[in-house]
Image (spheres, helix red, strand yellow):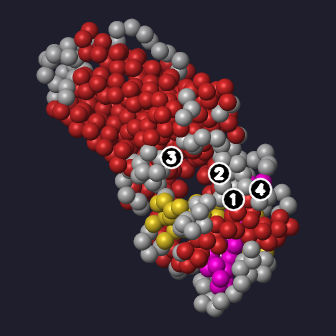
């Protein structure tokens, strides 16, 4: 390859990585944690584990009836989560179209009190999930922005492969230790990037499709399909054609009856939730969502039916899906790691953290490559980039740890203010302090907040790490143990940053002067 072409690819890789890198750090760090979202919800429970009701279907029906009684407008569209993998008690989600707000309802044992309601994203687990694809920005703007970031991410991957493919085998496992820290970081950056390349290709592709796929279809809607594209693909999205309300009253079968009809249509379906639209209307629809245990990437299956009569409209499983639906559900399974059980979850967790390191190290390499080696005063652009990298990346780490602490101590409070308070404080601190000192201090903050997670869990939930081990509460034990390991890693990084500032090259933005 010509030297000029290689320089263009290097420039593309560098600038695209810089523009997208910090947003991708947040996406990967938060995404690595959301792989275990169900386990984290169990970590945050108080007292003994809640027991599944003797009649979970009847309990779910009671929740639905009370929701429709207290909020009749929820009849337009409600999703009922059955007791099981997602928790021992049912919950209901209602998306309020008029205000673009998602509500979640759970049972209150006192029937004289209204249902317990919370906005989706209010708990710290849900907020971390949203953080993964919005970086904390308002939806849908944050979602669409991340779609663009995923496209840039793909460009960075392509250009990185073009640059480093010629020396792939020679430098793949080269980690040259010594005084040249830049070369060590470069080796680690390249090795992680190449070894996890398939994982990153999956995320760049699936992330773009899942966030801005609908926007990419809009030009075809008017230019090619004469406004009928959405009608052609709605079965791929929803499983059955969508119908407007008839504005005429009609019966809706009980949840138990709907489940029995669905079981007859697809006996192997393990139902996890029921989506209901236009409840009480003649055109009411019900879709049973669940999984079919098969040795395939995608295990999602569903049965769509008329909610008033139980007549099956469509039933689809992985082996009977349309090509479009198969691709979409397959991308979702790849993106979220919904296959392979715990082994894949741990793999995604490790690769997610490695991906976050990839973007963090990329920014540090850019800063190091542009420093003035013969003068102590460094260019403003490197100092600004160092401050942004430290503030955004370490602010995200500290903010997520603060969410765990806050969620354990104040489980009913909104989680977002806790994250943003820590994140913007770190960003401000990184801008005001010398980069070497800011890096050292912020890493210690990350270590302390992460180490506080087990203590907050003990204080808020009355069970410490060793008691969780003795009682077999494995989710709490492993999350607390991993938090301590990560806190130790951040502490070691803080010490290394201070040592680099004192003993490293004095002509560097990372030097203590």
Label tally: 4
The residue singled out by tag 3 in the image is: 125
Measured as percent of width and height from the top left, residue 486 is found at 47, 25
Q: Residue at x 32, y 41 (%)?
A: 423
The prevailing secondary structure element of the residues shown in magenta is: strand
What number is the disc on residue 461? none
The residue singled out by tag 2 in the image is: 86
| Tag 1 near tag 2, CB within 8 Å | yes
**Is residue 489 visible to us here?**
yes
Q: Earlier in the sequence, mark 2 or mark 4?
A: 4
Callout 3 environment at 10 Å: few (<14), some (14 to 19), or many (20+)?
Answer: many
Measured as percent of width and height from the top left, residue 346 is found at 62, 33
Task: Work out how far the residue at label 4 is from the one at label 1, CA to CA, in angstroms.
Answer: 13 Å
Does 91 sit above or below residue 367? Answer: below
Does 424 sit above or below residue 214? Answer: above
Q: Residue 262: within the magenta?
A: no
Q: Nearer the viewer, residue 321 or 172?
A: 321
Callout 2 environment at 10 Å: few (<14), some (14 to 19), or many (20+)?
Answer: some
Q: Residue at x 47, y 15 (%)?
A: 175
Q: Quadrant of residue 368?
A: top left
Q: Mark 1: which secondary structure?
A: loop
Q: Nearer the viewer, residue 190 or 493?
A: 493
The residue singled out by tag 4 in the image is: 54
Q: Mark 2: which secondary structure?
A: loop
Identify the image quadrant of the N terminus. top left
The residue singled out by tag 1 in the image is: 82
Task: Work out how far the residue at label 3 is from the one at label 4, CA to CA, in angstroms.
Answer: 28 Å
Task: Work out how far the residue at label 3 is from the one at label 1, CA to CA, in angstroms.
Answer: 19 Å
Relative to 329, 228 lies left or right: left
Which label sits in the foreground, 3 or 4? 4
Q: Which residues are magenta?
A: 272-292
Q: Earlier in the sequence, mark 4 or mark 1?
A: 4
């Amino acid at each position: 390859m010509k030297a000029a072409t290689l320089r263009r690819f290097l420039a593309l890789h560098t600038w695209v990585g810089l523009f997208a890198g910090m947003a991708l750090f947040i996406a990967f760090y938060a995404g690595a944690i959301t792989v275990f979202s169900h386990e984290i919800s169990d970590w945050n429970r108080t007292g003994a584990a809640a027991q599944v009701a003797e009649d979970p279907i009847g309990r779910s029906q009671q929740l639905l009836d009370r929701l429709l009684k207290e909020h009749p407008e929820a009849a337009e569209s409600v999703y009922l989560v059955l007791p099981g993998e997602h928790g021992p008690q049912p919950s209901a989600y209602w998306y309020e179209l008029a205000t673009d707000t998602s509500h979640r309802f759970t049972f209150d044992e006192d029937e004289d009190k209204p249902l317990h309601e919370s906005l989706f994203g209010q708990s710290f687990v849900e907020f971390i999930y949203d953080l993964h694809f919005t970086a904390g920005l308002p939806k849908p703007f944050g979602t669409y922005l991340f779609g663009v970031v995923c496209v840039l991410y793909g460009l960075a991957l392509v250009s990185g492969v073009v640059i480093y493919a010629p020396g792939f085998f020679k430098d793949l496992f080269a980690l040259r230790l010594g005084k040249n820290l830049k070369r060590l970081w470069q080796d680690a950056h390249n090795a992680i990037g190449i070894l996890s390349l398939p994982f990153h290709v999956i995320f760049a592709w699936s992330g773009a499709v899942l966030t801005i796929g609908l926007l990419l279809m809009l030009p075809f809607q008017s230019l090619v399909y004469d406004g009928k594209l959405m009608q052609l693909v709605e079965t791929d999205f929803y499983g059955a054609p969508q119908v407007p309300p008839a504005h005429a009253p009609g019966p809706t079968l009980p949840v138990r009856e709907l489940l029995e009809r669905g079981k007859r249509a697809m006996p192997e379906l393990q139902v996890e939730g029921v989506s209901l639209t236009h409840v009480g209307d003649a055109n009411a629809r019900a879709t049973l969502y669940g999984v079919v245990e098969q040795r395939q990437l995608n295990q999602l299956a569903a049965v769509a039916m008329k909610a008033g009569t139980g007549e099956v409209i469509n039933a689809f499983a992985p082996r009977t899906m349309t090509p479009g639906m198969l691709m979409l559900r397959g991308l979702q399974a790849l993106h979220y790691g919904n296959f392979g059980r715990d082994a894949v979850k741990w793999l995604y967790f490790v690769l997610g953290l490695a991906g976050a390191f990839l973007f963090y190290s990329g920014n540090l390499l850019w800063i190091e490559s542009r420093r003035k080696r013969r003068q102590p005063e460094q260019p403003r652009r490197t100092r600004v980039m160092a401050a942004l990298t430290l503030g955004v990346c370490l602010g995200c780490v500290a903010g997520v740890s603060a969410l765990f602490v806050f969620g354990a101590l104040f489980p009913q409070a909104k989680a977002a203010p806790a994250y943003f308070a820590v994140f913007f404080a770190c960003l401000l601190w990184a801008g005001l302090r010398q980069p070497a000192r800011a890096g050292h201090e912020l890493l210690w903050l990350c270590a302390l907040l992460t180490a506080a997670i087990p203590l907050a869990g003990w204080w808020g939930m009355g069970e410490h790490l060793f008691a969780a081990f003795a009682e077999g509460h494995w989710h709490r034990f492993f999350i607390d143990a991993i938090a301590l390991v990560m806190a130790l890693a951040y502490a070691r990084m803080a010490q290394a940053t201070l040592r680099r500032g004192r003993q490293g090259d004095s002509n560097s933005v990372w030097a203590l002067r």
